[in-house]
């Protein structure tokens, strides 16, 4: 065997690849990060925005684990806004418009500042596997690189095909070079690939947009940061603008449907339901007289604008007509047409929860390659794959987050256990323990994991532990500190809450929806001086105690099954009592736990009962866990 | 899938004798709370002794059944957990009531095969038997699922699907507003609309659960209710059909105040024949209560026998009764044909009409045959009843969750409402077998045009 050139090779420098490479390098490994095009590192080829419900949750979690995305977004935003402000803390979500060029430059700077990380341009055509182990990769230009771990983060480049009207060509997003041979190489390695489709809207020249006919959407006056480490920073924000399609828009689309590749059979891949093209929307919702369109800035130093809501693969002349039928865009000049893109993805049920391909030791896949969509979903997977590649080499316990501790856990479990039938996007409704997995407590949930793997510093862990302790103590104090009516009533009155007539515990008052921890400060002379973040946690924990404890009970039940491990060498084929379908599914996916087995489509409660019986039998024979 | 029943450590209860009529039936409770649950039913339990006593419903303050009960302490029991067994005498209705009381005290309804599985998991059953235990557990689980699904054919499944659809509608609006906050369409509809769907779901659930009582009757046979205005000879007719004097008859209108039930064999099909008080507006307090009871019987009868007086012809209140029952199945009986002075007038009803004289005993065979035909037909059809305790328990949980959302109305923080609604859907899903997560997303995406 030849010596290793690197510890980990990461193929693809998009959002997944950057996180994977950075995490692995920061954990001490020697990394080669290969990209098709050095000018396209950390590219945002679709909308220049990060965050929103579910996605922002992922970004905070990436940060708590010691990843990069949040820090870079915090340096590059053009506008920042908290969504769902009128709803509870579990679903409030930051969303940033990002300067997409600046984001790339920033990410490049960060990559280049890692001493153990080599960034290099190269088109990978083959993954080298020997005796079921990955050995490295080879490139189109005849180079061979060796490493015991390879992370594939190839995005939508695998056999990518871009389609606008009748015009189509093999390409990655935005006309990048596609990766054609790698698909074949993966198939030859025995991996099953699927084909998805996604799309993007036309971009217009901001100088030709009449924003006076649109509704201005400004950023927040008090911008917040994605990273727990970033200081709050005020900087001039750019506006977004809201407009709507008109009956004429819909008429133009209907008239041209025969030219739409989506409907004439030219596009075969399955597209996402949450990101339909405008022609899809018009067909599927014929009763809607208009659809929202947001005009968003892409960069501070360019006039280019992104038209969110107008994703399309209609021929460019039709796109022009469509755009100009929309208020404020009557004279708009398209500068890049919208397009659909079809690409291969690795069917993710072939992966372990570590994101390692089950059949090939040392090979990891992450990001859009695994059938997800979105920068945040990609980054989260990249981080986990990078971490696990290194932990695997060190012989340490892999990092597997559960559904009850992180959105990242939900994401990976969904991919691996349930599989995908459309590009997978994170939504808060996918998290069954949504009230516990909040953006505000990602640090409390995950910092210790980040520290364990070596990405979060001891100092950071210490700060989190201190915060945890302060929250605990303050909650205790609020339970036991009573206030008299004459002291607290003036403060209750200020927020429109009803008076009390006898002494009450402070916590009891905070449980009222209109009363906050902050607003009682004046009636609470013994209150210790605490960080604002601690106060926020105390407020949330006290207010939602009832629901939170209900969810914690559910987590407890969930954990019991999650902790029942299924040994990897279980022989499902010889288990009497399993249904044939369950036997096949279990044999193929080899879940790690009874809980995971239960979530596999086709495995019934009866089958799980059978598993429990066999587990016990095995334990008693003294070979099992 | 919910995973209920895959846990150990909680206390479970179930009927451990086959359902249906038998001499005695056993309710078995297993788990750490078995003893305290048994005692809470009013039983003086002693270890490994068969004790005699009464099961009490403390809340309703009434005796439920005369029983023998035994308590066996862990680990020398079938499941190796504490076990209490209650041997009841009162037939399926009483046994179910005892079981319900156990559940009300915190036990969980055991999954099929769960006692055996626990016995195995707790080391009670020999390792060599592992395979047969696995087979048995699976057969029980799948078998009962199939039975449950078979039960779901017809009206009940439609009703459950209706509830499910309303819940999904509400959840879709809420989840849509949480995950796609920038979409005006979603925001506009918001919670008020969800609340309307929920109120409708609550009503349906309440209706379904009110059928629970009727479900019992269903399991024990069809109910044929004799109804009509006072003194048309309903009790005489009942006696004639039963061929013995069961109901008190007199020429005084309003003699029957309570309702009287008797079992009757109609060509092999067992029915419960119910004689009711005459439907009238009475001044007498007792009789008024009798009338109310009669009306309840009428509204839940599987087959209705409306009795008319041939000596008086059709009167206004006859028409009222017939109109009220027009959607039910039944037949019209002209009684007192012996005293009829002219031909009976046409009756505005789609039901068959039979002419009899209970007094002289003629026409009764035709009546029996007509009744038998209707009953035979009706017994092929399943009414929308909740007949299994498992279903009832699931529907009750769903109702509880829906009510807790409705209590706060549209002021409920949506992410909290979503927790309760998912629980409700999960409970209903235990009956229908939908996968909650996928169903919710499907509904969100088919209802709203969301996304970029």
Image (cartoon, coloured by chain):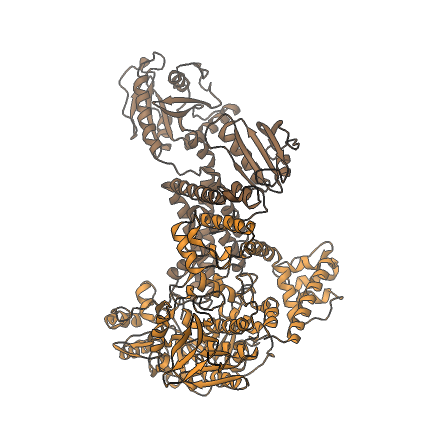
Chain colours: A orange, B brown
Regarding residue B8, the answer to whether it shows in the image is: yes
Residue B271 x/y as whole percent: 39, 25
Picture quadrant of residue B68: top right
Considering every residue shown, the one lying at the far bottom of the view is: A301
The front one of B288 and B422 is B422
Residue A491 x/y as whole percent: 69, 64
Write the residue at 61% across / 79% down. Answer: A231
The front one of B52 and A612 is A612
Residue A553 x/y as whole percent: 59, 54
Vertical placement of residue A71 versus A292, above or below: below
Write the residue at 55% across / 64% down. Answer: A90
Horizontal placement of A553 versus A382: left or right? right
Horizontal placement of A28 versus A575: left or right? right
Regarding residue A210, the answer to whether it shows in the image is: no
Considering every residue shown, the one lying at the far top of the view is: B360
Write the residue at 29% across / 14% down. Answer: B341
The front one of A30 and A44 is A30
Horizontal placement of B350 versus A209: left or right? left
Vertical placement of residue B285 versus A390, above or below: above
Residue A587 x/y as whole percent: 42, 57
Tally of numbered tags: 0
Considering every residue shown, the one lying at the far front of the view is: A1
Which quarter shows the C terminus of chain A? bottom right
């Amino acid at each position: 065997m030849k010596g290793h050139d690197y510890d980990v090779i990461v193929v693809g420098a998009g959002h997944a690849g950057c996180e994977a490479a950075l995490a692995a390098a920061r954990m001490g490994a020697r990394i080669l990060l290969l990209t098709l095009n050095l000018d396209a590192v950390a590219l945002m080829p679709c909308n220049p925005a990060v965050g929103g419900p579910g996605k922002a949750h992922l970004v905070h979690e990436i940060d708590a684990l010691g990843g990069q995305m949040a820090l870079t977004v915090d340096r590059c935003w053009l506008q920042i806004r908290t969504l769902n402000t009128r709803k509870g803390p579990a679903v409030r979500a930051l969303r940033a418009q990002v300067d997409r060029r600046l984001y790339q430059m920033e990410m490049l700077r960060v990559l280049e500042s890692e001493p153990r990380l080599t960034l290099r341009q190269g088109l990978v055509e083959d993954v080298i596997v020997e005796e079921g182990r990955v050995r490295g990769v080879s490139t189109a230009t005849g180079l061979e690189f060796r490493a015991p771990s390879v992370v594939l983060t190839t995005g939508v480049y695998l056999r990518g095909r871009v389609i606008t009207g009748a015009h189509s060509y093999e390409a990655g997003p935005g006309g990048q070079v596609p990766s054609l041979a790698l698909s074949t190489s993966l198939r030859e390695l025995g991996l099953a690939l699927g084909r998805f489709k996604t799309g993007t809207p036309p971009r217009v020249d901001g100088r030709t947009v009449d924003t006076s006919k649109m509704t201005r959407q400004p950023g927040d006056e008090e911008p917040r940061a994605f990273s727990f480490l970033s200081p709050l920073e005020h900087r001039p924000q750019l506006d977004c603008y809201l407009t709507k399609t008109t009956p004429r828009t819909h008429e133009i689309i209907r008239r041209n449907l025969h030219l739409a590749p989506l409907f004439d059979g030219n596009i075969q891949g399955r597209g996402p339901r949450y990101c339909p093209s405008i022609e899809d929307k018009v067909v599927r919702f014929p009763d809607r007289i208009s659809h929202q369109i947001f005009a968003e800035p892409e960069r501070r130093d360019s006039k280019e604008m992104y038209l969110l809501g107008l994703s399309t693969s209609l021929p460019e002349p039709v796109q022009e007509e469509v755009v100009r039928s929309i208020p404020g865009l009557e004279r708009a000049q398209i500068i890049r047409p919208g397009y659909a893109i079809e690409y291969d993805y690795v069917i993710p049920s072939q992966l372990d929860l570590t994101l390692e391909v089950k059949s090939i030791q040392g090979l990891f896949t992450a990001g859009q390659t695994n059938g997800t969509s979105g920068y945040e979903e990609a980054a989260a997977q990249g981080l986990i794959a990078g971490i696990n590649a290194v932990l695997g080499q060190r012989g340490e316990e892999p990092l597997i987050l559960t559904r009850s501790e992180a959105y990242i856990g939900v994401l990976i479990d969904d991919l691996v256990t349930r599989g995908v039938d459309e590009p997978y996007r994170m939504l808060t409704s996918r998290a069954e323990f949504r009230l516990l997995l909040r953006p505000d407590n990602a640090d409390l949930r995950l910092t210790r994991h980040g520290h364990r793997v070596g990405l979060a510093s001891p100092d950071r862990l210490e700060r989190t532990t201190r915060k945890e302790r302060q929250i605990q103590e303050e909650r205790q104090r609020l339970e036991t500190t009573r206030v008299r009516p004459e002291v607290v009533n003036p403060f209750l009155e200020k927020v429109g809450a009803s008076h009390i007539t006898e002494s009450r515990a402070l916590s009891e008052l905070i449980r009222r929806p209109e009363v906050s921890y902050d607003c009682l400060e004046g009636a609470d002379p013994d209150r210790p001086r605490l960080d604002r973040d601690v106060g926020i946690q105390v407020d949330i924990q006290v207010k939602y105690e009832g629901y939170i404890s209900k969810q914690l009970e559910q987590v407890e039940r969930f954990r019991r099954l999650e902790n029942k491990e299924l040994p990897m060498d279980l022989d499902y084929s010889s288990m009497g009592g399993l249904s044939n379908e369950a036997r096949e599914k279990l044999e193929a996916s080899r879940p790690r736990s009874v809980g995971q087995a239960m979530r596999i489509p086709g495995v019934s409660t009866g089958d799980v009962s059978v598993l429990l019986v066999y587990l016990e039998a095995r334990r008693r024979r003294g070979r099992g866990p | 899938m919910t995973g209920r029943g895959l846990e150990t450590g909680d206390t479970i209860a179930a009927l451990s004798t086959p359902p249906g009529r038998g001499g005695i039936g056993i309710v078995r409770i297993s788990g750490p709370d078995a003893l305290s649950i048994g005692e809470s039913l009013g039983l003086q339990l002693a270890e490994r002794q068969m004790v005699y006593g009464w099961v009490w419903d403390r809340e309703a303050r009434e005796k439920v059944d005369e029983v023998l009960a035994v308590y066996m302490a862990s680990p020398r029991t079938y499941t190796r957990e504490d076990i209490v067994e209650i041997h009841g005498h009162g037939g399926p209705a009483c046994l179910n009531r005892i079981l319900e009381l156990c559940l009300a005290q915190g036990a969980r309804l055991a999954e099929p095969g769960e006692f055996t599985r626990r016995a195995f998991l707790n080391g009670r059953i020999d390792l060599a038997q592992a395979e047969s235990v696995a087979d048995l557990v699976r057969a029980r689980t799948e078998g009962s699922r199939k039975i449950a699904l078979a039960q779901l054919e017809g009206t009940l499944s439609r009703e459950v699907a209706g509830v499910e659809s309303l819940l999904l509608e509400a959840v879709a609006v809420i989840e849509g507003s949480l995950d796609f906050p920038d979409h005006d369409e979603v925001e506009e509809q918001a919670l008020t609309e969800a609340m309307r769907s929920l109120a409708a779901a609550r009503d349906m659930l309440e209706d379904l659960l009110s059928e629970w009582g009727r479900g019992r009757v269903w399991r024990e046979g069809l109910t044929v209710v004799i109804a009509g205005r006072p003194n048309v000879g309903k009790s005489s007719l009942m006696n004639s059909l039963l061929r013995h004097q069961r109901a008190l008859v007199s020429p005084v209108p309003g003699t029957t105040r309570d309702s009287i039930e008797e079992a009757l064999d109609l060509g092999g099909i067992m029915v419960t024949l119910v004689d009711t008080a005459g439907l009238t507006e009475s001044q007498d307090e007792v009789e008024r209560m009798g009338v109310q009871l009669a009306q309840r019987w009428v509204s839940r009868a599987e087959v209705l026998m409306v009795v008319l007086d041939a000596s008086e012809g059709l009167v206004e209140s006859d028409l009222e009764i017939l109109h009220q029952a027009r959607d039910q199945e039944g037949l019209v009986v002209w009684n007192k044909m012996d005293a009829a002075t002219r031909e009976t007038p046409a009756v505005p009803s789609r039901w068959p009409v039979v002419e009899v004289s209970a007094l002289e005993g003629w026409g009764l065979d035709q009546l029996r045959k007509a009744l038998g035909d209707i009953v035979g037909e009706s017994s092929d059809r399943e009414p929308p009843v909740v007949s299994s305790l498992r279903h009832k328990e699931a529907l009750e949980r769903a109702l509880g969750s829906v009510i807790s959302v409705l209590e706060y109305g549209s002021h409920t923080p949506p992410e909290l409402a979503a927790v309760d609604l998912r629980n409700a859907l999960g409970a209903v899903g235990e009956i229908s077998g939908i996968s909650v997560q996928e169903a919710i997303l499907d509904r969100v995406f088919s209802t709203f045009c969301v996304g970029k």
